[in-house]
Image (spheres, rainbow, N blue to C red):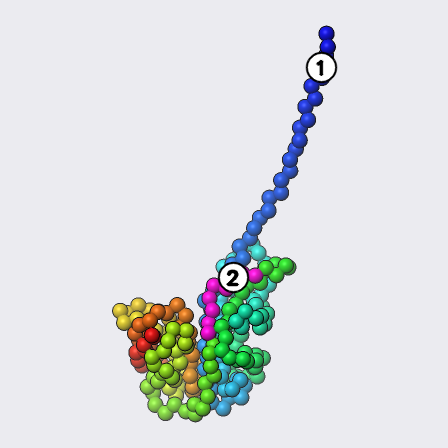
């Protein structure tokens, strides 16, 4: 009688579980351009604020932000803003050179510098020049009507150093955009028309307890 030996080989397969994090984009990209006559701290008297909110939290390590002019990397920063305020020398004198351009911001993650998507952008198309003073307290629009993609440029009254709020509503009362300005400087405040559609809008500025309004057409 023959004896057979049954050999059973057990193979243990090991698997590696890879965890993919969330490379979240920045939030609330905001651009404001202000013409401050005879302020030499701002390039061409054009002060600006480019700011955004940090991404939603994730397991990835946020290193900072890449700021792009069109598709070209302009600067890397760990801050959530790039600003020439007019109150101190500007570190970004090349911001407007050359014009025009689109600005996008991408979050940078981990040691291998993974990049988020750019979920918003702003268009910077021109410098304001030769605006000496604003002599009345009425809103003046630099251009009206304007086209989609152009900036809304508002001449702010003479309320130097005052805080103000600006709201843009549709004619049915829906709030489209809202901005808080810490200090008014004589000149022009510039806002993007990003995410706005063609139509008639109402711009309201609240200054020192009073509201000044004017309509603008986007075509």
**Does 123 appear above or below 118?**
below
In this view, the residue in front, 88 or 21, is: 21
Q: Which element is circle 2 on?
A: loop
**Does 103 appear above or below 11?**
below
Residue 136 location (% of width, % of height): 34, 90
- Magenta stretch containing residue 189, yes or no? no
**Does 58 appear above or below 3?**
below
Tell me, yes or no, if residue 84 can be seen here.
Answer: no
Any mark on residue 117, and which? 2
- Magenta stretch containing residue 116, yes or no? yes
Q: Which residue is mark 1?
A: 4
Q: Main secondary structure of the magenta part?
A: loop
Q: Magenta span covers which residues?
A: 115-123
> Would you say 133 lies left or right of 82 here?
left
In this view, the residue in front, 165 or 64, is: 64
Q: How many marks?
A: 2
> Would you say 169 lies left or right of 89 here?
left
**Does 155 appear above or below 166?**
below
Tell me, yes or no, if residue 214 can be seen here.
Answer: yes
Q: Quadrant of residue 201?
A: bottom left
Disc nearer the start of the sequence (1/2): 1
Residue 166 location (% of width, % of height): 37, 76
């Amino acid at each position: 009688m023959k004896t057979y030996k049954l050999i059973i080989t057990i193979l243990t397969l090991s698997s590696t579980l890879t965890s993919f994090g969330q490379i979240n984009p920045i939030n609330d990209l905001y651009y404001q351009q202000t013409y401050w006559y005879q302020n030499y701290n701002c390039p061409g008297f054009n002060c600006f604020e480019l700011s955004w909110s940090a991404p939603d939290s994730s397991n990835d390590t946020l290193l900072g932000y890449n700021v792009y002019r069109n598709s070209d990397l302009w600067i890397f920063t760990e801050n959530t803003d790039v600003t020439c305020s007019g109150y101190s020398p500007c570190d970004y004198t090349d911001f407007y050179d050359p014009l025009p351009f689109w600005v996008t911001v991408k979050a940078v993650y981990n040691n291998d510098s993974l990049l988020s998507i750019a979920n918003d952008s702003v268009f910077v198309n021109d410098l304001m020049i030769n605006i000496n003073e604003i002599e009345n307290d009425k809103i003046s629009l630099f251009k009206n009507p304007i086209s989609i993609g152009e900036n809304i440029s508002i001449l702010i009254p003479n309320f130097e150093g005052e805080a103000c709020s600006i709201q843009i509503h549709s004619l049915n009362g829906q709030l489209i955009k809202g901005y808080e300005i810490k200090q008014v400087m004589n000149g022009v405040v510039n806002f993007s028309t990003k995410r706005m559609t063609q139509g008639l809008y109402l711009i309201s500025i609240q200054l020192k307890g009073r509201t000044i309004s004017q309509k603008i057409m986007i075509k």
